[in-house]
Image (cartoon, helix red, strand yellow):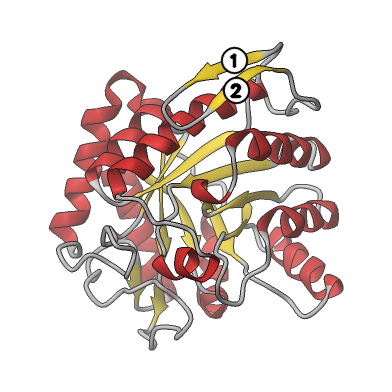
Amino acid sequence: MRRFRFGAVIRQAESGKEWAEKARRLEGSGFDVLLVPDHLVGPRFAPVAALTAAACATTRLRVGTLVLANDFRHPAVLAKETATLDLLSDGRLEVGLGTGWMAGDYASAGMPLDPPGVRVERLAEALAVLRGLWGDGPFTFEGAHYRVRGLDQRPKPVSRPHPRLLLGAGGPRMLRLAAREADVVHLTTRVRGDGSGPDERDGGLAAYLDKLRTVREAAGGRYERLELGTSVLQAGERRAEEAWSAAASARLEDTPQVLLGTRRDIADRLRHWRDEHDLSYFVVHHERDLGVLTPVVEELAGA
């Protein structure tokens, strides 16, 4: 049986001291991972610096990204940054990646937002470059989007063969890529190709179960080695969506992304999704829900 793991997205703090205290509270409450998102707009820390500080403030807590936008960094730069962070955290880094998708990020920075297929192809190449540069010896790569020639970066990651790779995926192409390439498949809501928000065709139990089937079929023989995760967008009782957040939960009833009810209700639903559907990694999307979900984490951590 797959063991539960729990993460929480923490976006910012008013000082370094407060940030360190948040990380230590998560660690003391049984959470496994502190996660930072990657957007150019909105109230969010830059991920690499924030995760380095969180790792230095803790001893057991893993740190990761949910998720880095591939379009924001050349994979050679990202390989160097993540290898350094993995070393400084004593191998506690989890690298979450996605294509990049939010139109506001691209428009505000004057970057072109390519069609989804192009972004997925570019991410697939970036994964090959990351693995190559994290490995031993010089690495060369010739692709449609990236070219690397005889590059041997130092340091290498402490985690071998490389840090755990998480891919966030909502649409079929990303789900299949994640099933083939990731250590962790993080199921998300599908977004529109123009990056304007959630795809109205997605939502509900049937769509969520279809995503799980897509992952299982695409993973083939490696399915049993995958960890399946998702973000909890509402917990306890439903609240209004945060104005700054792109997450939308209105059409996600009956999925593990909306966990309403008592502590017992929530714990029972998490067990159901793990035991019946192999989902074992649950991430608290909003800090406001930590009060509701921390007692559940304390009960289920390690189970």
Label 2 sits on residue: 148
What's the mark number on residue 194?
Answer: none
Q: Is residue 298 visible?
A: no
Q: Is residue 82 left or right of residue 245?
A: right
Q: Position of residue 160 (x, y in %)?
A: 66, 22
Q: Is residue 43 visible?
A: yes
Q: Position of residue 294 (x, y in %)?
A: 57, 69
Label 1 sits on residue: 140
Residue found at x 38% / y 71%: 247
Residue found at x 18% / y 68%: 200
Q: Position of residue 108 (x, y in %)?
A: 51, 71
Q: Is residue 13 left or right of residue 96?
A: right
Q: Position of residue 104 (x, y in %)?
A: 44, 71
Residue found at x 71% / y 11%: 137
Quarter of the image where one finds residue 275? top left
Q: Secondary structure at mark 2?
A: strand
State the residue lying farthest toward the top: 137
Q: Is residue 97 above or below residue 202?
A: above
Frontmost residue, 272 versus 213: 213
> What kind of residue is marked 2?
Val
> What kind of residue is marked 1?
Thr
Frontmost residue, 114 versus 252: 114
Quarter of the image where one finds residue 7? bottom right
Q: Kindly report the distance in space between the C-alpha atoms of the residues bearing marks 2 and 1.
A: 5 Å
Q: Is residue 11 above or below residue 50?
A: below
Question: Which of the two discs, 2 and 1, labels the residue nearer the N terminus?
Answer: 1
Q: Secondary structure at mark 1?
A: strand
Give the position of the N terminus as an image quadrant. top left
Q: Is residue 95 above or below residue 294?
A: above
Residue contact between numbered discs 2 and 1, judged by CB atoms under 8 Å: yes
Q: Is residue 294 left or right of residue 265?
A: right
Residue found at x 58% / y 52%: 65
